[in-house]
Amino acid sequence: MADLLEQRKTLHRRVKDIEEKYQALEDAVMRLQPLANLGMAWAMTAHELNNLLMPVINYSQLALQNPADGVLCEKAIQKSVLLGERAAAILEKTMMLASETPMKKEKHSLDLLLDNVFICIGRDFKKDKIQVIQEVAEHIEIRADGVAIQQVFMNLILNARHAMLERGGQLKISAEETVDGTSIQISDTGCGIEPDMLKKIFTPFYTSGKDGGNGLGLAFCRKVIEAHSGFITVESDPGCGTRFKIMLPKYTI
């Protein structure tokens, strides 16, 4: 009987020790989580800034190569300033995502947002043998953080372009208003995504290693869309193309 009581005491001590160690680990995780969020935010920021810095460099080089063309230089400088301001705003947005601070959502015309994205990209898709089809009615409006949602569109459009660089193709952007909200689709006829990759496509740092990416662009997209109480999905056929679908809640005043 005494041996049984001692065994129970020993067992209770072990359980208590395990509980204390578990609590200590949980406290450590809680302390480290803000640092993990900060690290993810800066990684995403670096990815998004890279998307914006490339056209800044291109516009600046264009101005330097044509110093006698005042009109061209002025346009190039204006676009560089626009991209610089957008880069500064992205720094703020990614930190808001990390801290889960609500974004300020305002009414925006969807077709104007998309037009501005192509201006920021500053690339003639025809030179890449890519046909751009935009089927977005002028009356469609969304309630969103303009800078953040445009960065989502930029990511998806640049990904589509990259998928079609080898043989060209068609980039199609369409939108429609539904009972639940606004459905936006961005599709391409590029190389497509393998099924095993498709399951992890929105996972931070997940990449095939073939496209030179760091696996953060789509993770950023999902985080922004979820911050807008929406969702993003993807469908793809290897060798045929990929289609991303974004659903944003119905705009209300």
Image: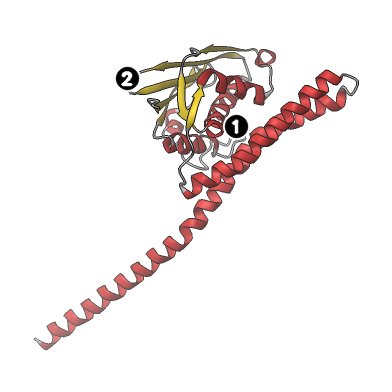
Q: Tell me the residue at 42%/16% (across/down).
A: 176
Q: Farthest residue toward the front? A: 253
Q: Nearer the viewer, mark 2 or mark 1?
A: 2
Q: Which residue is mark 1?
A: 211
Side (left or right) of 179 relative to 31: left
Which circle marks residue 179 in the picture?
Answer: 2
Residue positioned most to the right: 68
Q: Quadrant of residue 236?
A: top left
Which is nearer the eye, 34 or 209?
34
Near mark 2 (Cα within 10 A), the count class, few <14, some 14-19 or many ≥20, is: few
From the viewer's side, name the closer residue of 241 and 63: 63
State whether residue 37 appears in this view.
yes
Q: As drawn, is 65 to the left or to the right of 53? A: right
The residue drawn where x is 61% and y is 37% is 48
Quadrant where the C terminus sits is top left
Label 2: state its secondary structure. loop
Residue extending farthest to the bottom is 2
**Residue 133 to residue 120: above or below:** above
Q: At which x and y percent is residue 36? A: 50, 54
So how many labels did they put on this image?
2
Residue located at (55% from left, 29% from top): 150
Residue 128, given in percent of the width and then of the height, sits at 67, 16
Q: Position of residue 214 (x, y in %)?
A: 58, 40
